[in-house]
Structures are given as C-alpha cells and as structure tokens.
Image (spheres, helix red, strand yellow):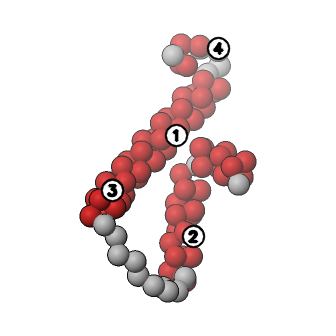
Amino acid sequence: LHSQTEYPFYHSLIHWITFIILIYWVDQRTPRLKQASLSGVTKTLTRVMSLFIPILVITYMVASLHTNYVLAKFEKSDPVDVTILE
C-alpha cells in the first residue's frame, strides 16, 4: 500500500482529492450497525485531532508542491543554476 500511494500523494493534489472522495463514498455506503458512547476525553481528543491532522496534511502538501515547483524551475534553467535549490 505504501509504495502505491507515496509517489502520487507526494506529487499531486488531485490524487489526494480523489482519495478523500473515495473514502467519503465508501463511508456513505457502509451501513451503520451500532452506536458507541465515548468518554469526554475521547471526544475532546477526537475534536483536536480532527483539526490537527488536516492542518498537518495541508502543510505537507503545500511543502511538497513547492518543492516540486522549485525542482521543475531548476530543471528548466538553461545554464544550470544551483542557487535555485537553496
């Protein structure tokens, strides 16, 4: 699974969007079987993580897209300009 997802997710935003849509679609088609009660700590932790994880993923995606942009700019420079990579 890791080898199938690392490269596309690292280099393409559309792969992330497609993956999230597919997860949502599968989640909507899954029947709801039972409800479980959660403690206050678990609810708070879930709420905090539901904010923290997307922020972390967005930061990672922006950094990887910027890196991709810089590498493409370096590859297109006719006389090789190493200062672009700094």
Which residue is pictured at 72% across the width and 48% down the height?
A: 3
Q: Which residue is mark 2?
A: 22
- Could you say which disc has been placed on residue 45 in the image? 3
Give the structural element (helix, strand or loop) at label 1.
helix
Number of other residues with Cα within 10 Å of mark 1, as a class: few under 14, some 14 to 19, many 20 or more: some
The amino acid sitting under disc 3 is Leu
Q: Residue at x 41, y 82 (%)?
A: 35
* Label 3 vs 2, first from the N-terminus: 2
Q: Position of residue 74 (x, y in %)?
A: 60, 24
The label nearer to you, 3 versus 4, is 3
Secondary element at image label 3: helix
Q: What's the distance in space between the residues labelled 1 and 3, CA to CA?
A: 30 Å
Kindly identify which numbered label has been placed on residue 79.
4
For discs 3 and 2, the disc positioned in front in the rendered view: 3
For the residue labelled by badge 4, is the local secondary structure a helix, a strand or a loop?
loop
Q: Would residue 72 be visible to someone looking at this image? A: yes
- As rendered, which of 53 and 79 lies closer to the eye? 53
Which of the two residues, 29 or 38, is positioned nearer the viewer here?
Answer: 38
Q: Using the image, determine if residue 18 lies above or below residue 31.
A: above
Q: How many neighbours does mark 3 have within 10 angstroms: few (below 14), some (14-19), or many (20 or more)?
A: few
Mark 2 neighbour density, 10 Å: few (under 14) some (14–19) many (20 or more)? few
Residue identified by numbered label 1: 65
Q: Position of residue 15 (x, y in %)?
A: 59, 56
Q: Are marks 3 and 4 in contact (CB under 8 Å)?
A: no
Between the residue at mark 3 and the residue at mark 4, the CA separation in whole angstroms equals 52 Å
Q: Residues within 10 Å of mark 4 (few under 14, many from 20)?
A: few
